[in-house]
Image: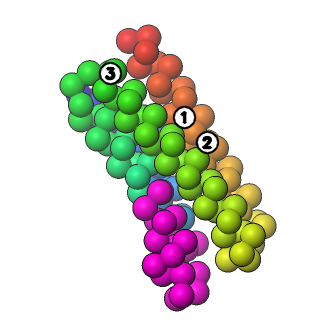
Amino acid sequence: MHNLREIKVWRKAIELSTVVYQVVSNFPSEEKYGLSSQIKRSVVSIASNIAEGAGRNSNKEFIQFLGIANGSSYELLTQIMIAKNLNLVDSIQTEFLITQIEEVQKMIYGFTKKLRKD
């Protein structure tokens, strides 16, 4: 098992969740159960799967959950692009979020490589 609070990518995923929730709070109310809800589920899934993996008994299991977290990050990226195309987020917000998502993806990749070596 790993100390969750020491895992940088988990902390970064929590930060990303906070930012995404703030952005989505500005969506129109008719999106509450549509794209807004899906975006929230995806972003929360990233940090949640990292946390679940950290609580597993082996690095192999942890790596599996990091893969799921990474998949959720790609879902989130897709949903942010759809939101941009629907003019729910502006170009500046979109670029900022994409940069943050890509940073999390790189951190997941790097952490996965490290766990494979251990």
Q: CA distance from mark 2 to mark 1?
A: 6 Å
Label 3 Cα crowd, 10 Å radius (few <14 / some 14-19 / many 20+): some
The span from disc 1 to disc 3 (Cα, nearest Å) is: 16 Å
Does 117 sit above or below residue 63?
A: above
Q: Is residue 19 visible?
A: yes
- Spatial CA distance of label 2 from label 3 is 22 Å
Q: Main secondary structure of the magenta part?
A: helix
* Tag 2 near tag 1, CB within 8 Å: yes
Secondary structure under tag 3 reads: helix
Who is closer to the viewer here, 80 or 23? 80
Q: Identify the residue at the far top of this view.
A: 117
Q: Is residue 39 magenta?
A: yes
The answer to whether residue 64 is left or right of residue 1 is right
Q: Which mark is residue 107?
A: 1
The residue labelled by disc 2 is 103
Q: Amino acid at mark 2?
A: Glu
Q: Which residues are magenta?
A: 21-43
Q: Which structural element holds mark 1?
A: helix
Q: Is residue 26 visible?
A: no
Image height of 68 relative to 25, above or below: above
85, above or below 46, in the image = below
What residue does disc 3 label?
59
